[in-house]
């Protein structure tokens, strides 16, 4: 039981505060023989990085990953892989005035009640800076899943405030469009509208929520543990553990409330499933369909707009957050959601072969699209 | 790592298949000295029971709980508490014709792909019968939380298909109304409408989804672990582990996507928080406000309506489910959601005092409503 | 974290008090497809049973195992296997006079200090009755290890007081002799001497310690986790968790203190290892040699000989234990040690294939006896 | 489940290879408010350090600990504490000639069979270099145990080859003598004999085993979990996880085999226990007496004396270890055993207060020495 560790057999233990000397993680349980180099982390870290566009926070970190252990002559050895990133752009002075204040919507008050002490610099441990290491660890999982099983993980922004992509764009997502968009947005035609919206939002000093959808293709059927280690249960825990997340849904999610059973249940045909309301999971176990998980991000509470708050003596004070903050934290959360999806899948892959052996060893198959 | 165990310090390990000889659980980590008797379980098990009204499944079990261990002279001793319920109303013949079929929307195919073998009687391990033991274990948690901290856990049905309770009824819930309703519904005026709706649904042979909201009052601030053991993260895992759940949200949940930050962030005043969009959790830690978690239940896939499916040889077959099934499984899921909320809170209470000591020992306080 | 659960991927959660209604366990993580029937448990439970000969305790239990879950049509399904044994021969009256006393050498005082409450009937949870379920769970592990890998687990009594078997008898153990002996003793010629010793001991009202050695043949190289999940580390935890155990050693154990390095290190030759001081484990990982673990059992503290003790008020009282007790608990601990060895090996087998794949998939081999 | 993590509620995850860029650990679960500075680690690391005297290995590392997280303004904050030590004295060239050889008595062959790949530089992950982080983490545990409960942890060398300290020296240990001895030896009169012995041993190119005894005073009664989380069970796992350990005993240990029950059981008197054969643990739970755990270290297998071995192709090769190695690894293992004892006690302290509340809250007491 560790509140800073994620995963059972492929586990990631993270550490570090926003403005401490470094952040890092220890990845334990990675199979031996996987090629891994410091450069492998750059792509996803850049996608997550602050400063990708004018629509996200202006904090800029080199985010150079150092591999401290677990890799020998370019291959993983089966021993723990420690990753380290030094914090270089800390600007602690931005935060000194809030050391005695509770910012509304932030973890300040909760941490203070829990521990009786807190590191106020940039949110300390509660900062989204921690998610950098999730993305780094997720890179390892993505790599192994792709090489070993052909599993591919993707993510996109599926809602920004009340704007949603066009149905055609989401029915058949063009991942090149998503990647070339400053918003991980699948509908190229809407980008100007989004830019206008975000510019106005930033000027207003306010923020807005978003929805991120992450998917995984080529996941073999049979991954996931029934009852309390369900694939969807682990995904829910994974996504809800990301900063600012307030909701998680699998497949049809909350829309299934208004569905009839005859509509929701995905029929099986010799050519495969006829629909995917389930989001690729039945009874907590993968079905071989695309895994689909969506996550609701609240609007960030770090606003230039002043608000009344309390200080640690219970006095009313005016709180203004003057640091660097995204008006929509959901945008660059996309690679974080991908990483958490990859981490859950890799963990479940190892759990599956622990109990049931390597894929293909004991599992019966039926012909057609179901075969893996 | 056990896929049949929930919780870290107050853990529940369940076992049993729908039509096996018995179901049961082992509750480990219960503090010593709590009064506990077999009769304590009756109330919530009855609330969950099949057959409460004509709107839920007709399966009738006595659901008599036997305490096998961990209680001496009416008090818990700190050793594991094993609970056992014999299955008496099994009717296995209802299910024999589907042993070689994959029912659409059910776990049959996923289990078969995972294990290469499955117990087809009533869904075996994937049956919601397992949730009986969650409710039983939850009873212990509810009792301890109430006696030790005054925490009260409640649940209600907050949506049935596209029907929602009136705003006034949910703004100030009258729990007597909820408990006297056959639907755990907070708006007494709507019950006739719901009965008409459910009667028509049952006649049609179809089913519909629902939303359940569970709340906890008097939770002290400071419960919950940051990062991966977050209170909301554990709640998400807990709820998503319930059969038929497709989504979980905390506080404003998915509605926070369209909120502005200035609207969402809950301001603190000397009289307490001015709103509760957060659902009582910030940074993964309780704030002292009401904990609010909502859960989306899909429509059950067990329908009298026939559908094409596949058998284990890949042939198309017609599947009709003739057993006893609820047209809306969300209704009697209400006490299950309560139980999971109680289990998470109790586990977090023990985790909190492990690291930070008993409440009141190390935690600073500010005056007013925040004080506990 | 559960103090009543053993194992990570093949886990056993036990429950039950000596004189409660039942004892039982939940075995989670067993691979699907293993043949298992209630009769499989009888052999080892009989070997462990009280009352096997006049040299062990006279308590007689039917110890009939009921399989409550996890087995369908004679095969394990991958879901948790719950086992139950009703307590039938409880004789609680034997123990009523010690409810307010702390028996010297027993857990009474420690439990009372920990929990402030304890079940005094037969030692409650601290009774060796709990080990019945270890033996039952160990039966499943032994069966899978044998069928899947040809691993065989054996145990014998390697010292009783100051009596040790002849060197020739232990150099090449004849397991038929061990099994036909009332003492699990490998040297048939010594049995009369042992019987005389034990008769005198029993008459004296005193007790004596013993050493049990458990071995496993055909364990593939590569099982065990480095650093904190070492095969020998898990074995140490397993054996030390058995009632009355005060020491554990692997291979040469404490004798290695006086060895020179040139003597202790086992040389490798093309025909295999030239010796086995290591006991089959190097760096926490199996080498393919026989696993050898020895365990020291203290003399039982339950004696007819009176002793001064304290009661719960701190007063001096005379304590006499009048229940049924073995003058040497180590004798029937032999199958318990075997069971713990099997449980550790099975868990490590699953952990190995989680990270490294099934045996033969990724592991390099060199020719000769090292090959598996 | 992580093979590189120790402890449940106060957990230490270590990483790093002997000749990689760094070693480190993440300590999770430390209570908030403990004063901690980089300088706190120096004392025990120096005691463990190679190069303390001519009788231990000549490798010299600065072993400067950097605190990367979890401490703010000199106090722990409750978030994970990451510690880092850069490897500066690596001399990899010493080891290149053994990259294709299996050194007898080392983990080379076992790692190669497990992973199919290994880092041969200085033993890689299997090097005792890893224990540096145990000592560092143990420093935190020692500090908290002392400040919060007055618990003091000590260790000494209790046997070197066949030399044992005089009875008078061990009956009442003078810790100043132990600390001023180059061998952590409690009998000052024997130091010249030991020096002569070790000089001869080093000249011979051979090595010898040793026994280390670690003790803890002022441990409150009630710490430890019954059955599988026993205090002595966790100690056995902890000690057996140290490199080169082949045996562990609690209290009388293996000597209890030849004891009678009337001799072994420690009588309770109004003045306290009359003896301590139990080593401070009954039923897996502390009794308030001194905790005593002894550990057997094998002679190191790294010898200048040549031996026939095998290479990875199965050919016979002559193996000579030319690096820096201790002729008796047990000597500087003393602070490692202390650290593991402290880590186990701290973890159990947190586990105890999770279930039973802070000491003094629920536990009954009897007068006299038993009171804490």
Image (cartoon, coloured by chain):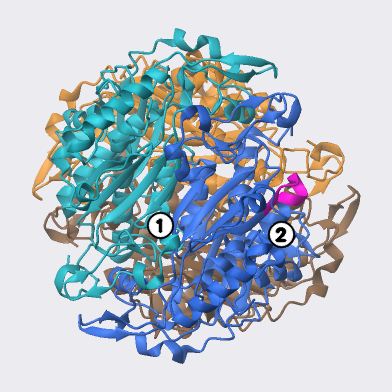
Chain colours: A blue, B cyan, C orange, D brown
Note whether D268 is above or below A139 in the view shown.
above
Please provide percent x and percent y for residue B336. Answer: 32, 37
Q: Is residue A149 magenta?
A: yes
Magenta-highlighted residues: A145-153
Residue D126, can we see it? no
Please provide percent x and percent y for residue A240. Answer: 46, 56
Chain letter for mark 2, please.
Answer: D
Observer-side mark, 1 or 2, equals 1
Chain letter for mark 1, please.
Answer: B
Q: Residue furthest bottom?
A: A93
Q: Quadrant of the C terminus of chain C?
A: top right
> Which residue is more in the foreground, D60 or C166?
D60
> Which residue is more in the foreground, A180 or D270?
A180
Please provide percent x and percent y for residue C32. Answer: 59, 26
| Image mark for residue A152 | none
Note whether C74 is above or below A25 in the view shown.
above
Q: Residue furthest top?
A: B93
Residue drawn at the location 24% of the way across and 40% of the way down? B140
Q: Is residue A173 magenta?
A: no
Residue drawn at the location 38% of the way across and 70% of the way down? D78
**Which residue is under mark 2?**
D301
State whether discs 1 and 2 lie on one chain.
Answer: no
Crowding at dot 2, Cα within 10 Å, few <14 / some 14-19 / many 20+, comes out as: many
Note whether C109 is above or below D238 in the view shown.
above
**Which residue is under mark 1?**
B255
Q: Is residue B212 left or right of residue C171?
A: left
Residue drawn at the location 53% of the way across and 72% of the way down? A197
Label 2, secondary structure: give it. Answer: loop
């Amino acid at each position: 039981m560790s509140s800073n560790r994620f995963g059972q057999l492929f586990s990631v233990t993270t550490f570090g505060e926003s403005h401490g000397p470094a952040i890092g993680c220890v990845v334990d349980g990675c199979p031996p023989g996987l090629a891994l180099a410091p450069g492998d982390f750059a792509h996803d870290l850049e996608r997550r990085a602050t400063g990708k566009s004018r629509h996200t926070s202006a904090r800029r970190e080199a985010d150079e990953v150092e591999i401290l252990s677990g890799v020998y002559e370019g291959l993983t050895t089966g021993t723990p892989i420690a990753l380290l990133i030094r914090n270089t752009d800390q600007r602690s002075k931005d935060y000194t005035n809030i050391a005695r204040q509770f910012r509304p919507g932030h973890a300040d008050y909760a941490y203070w009640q829990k521990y009786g002490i807190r590191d106020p610099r940039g949110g300390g441990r509660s900062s989204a800076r921690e998610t950098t290491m999730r993305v780094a660890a997720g890179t390892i999982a993505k790599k192994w899943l792709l090489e070993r099983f052909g599993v591919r993980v993707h993510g996109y922004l599926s809602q920004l405030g009340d704007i949603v992509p066009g149905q055609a764009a989401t029915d058949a997502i063009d991942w090149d469009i998503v990647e070339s968009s400053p918003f991980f947005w699948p509908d190229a035609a809407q980008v100007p509208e989004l830019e206008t919206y975000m510019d106005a939002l930033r000027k207003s000093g306010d923020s807005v929520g978003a929805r991120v959808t992450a998917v995984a293709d080529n996941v073999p059927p049979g991954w996931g543990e029934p009852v309390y280690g369900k694939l969807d249960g682990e995904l829910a825990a994974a996504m809800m553990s990301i900063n600012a997340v307030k909701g998680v849904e699998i497949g049809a999610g909350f829309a299934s409330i208004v569905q009839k059973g005859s509509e929701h249940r995905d029929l099986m045909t010799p050519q495969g499933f006829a629909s995917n309301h389930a989001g690729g999971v039945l009874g907590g176990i993968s079905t071989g369909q695309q895994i689909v998980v969506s996550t609701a991000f609240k609007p960030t509470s770090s606003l230039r707009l002043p608000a009344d708050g309390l200080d640690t003596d219970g006095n009313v004070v005016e709180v203004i957050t003057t640091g660097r903050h995204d008006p929509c934290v959901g945008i660059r959360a996309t690679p974080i959601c991908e990483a958490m999806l990859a981490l859950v899948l890799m963990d479940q892959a190892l759990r599956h072969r622990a109990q049931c052996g390597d894929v293909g060893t004991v599992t019966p198959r039926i012909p057609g699209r179901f075969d893996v």
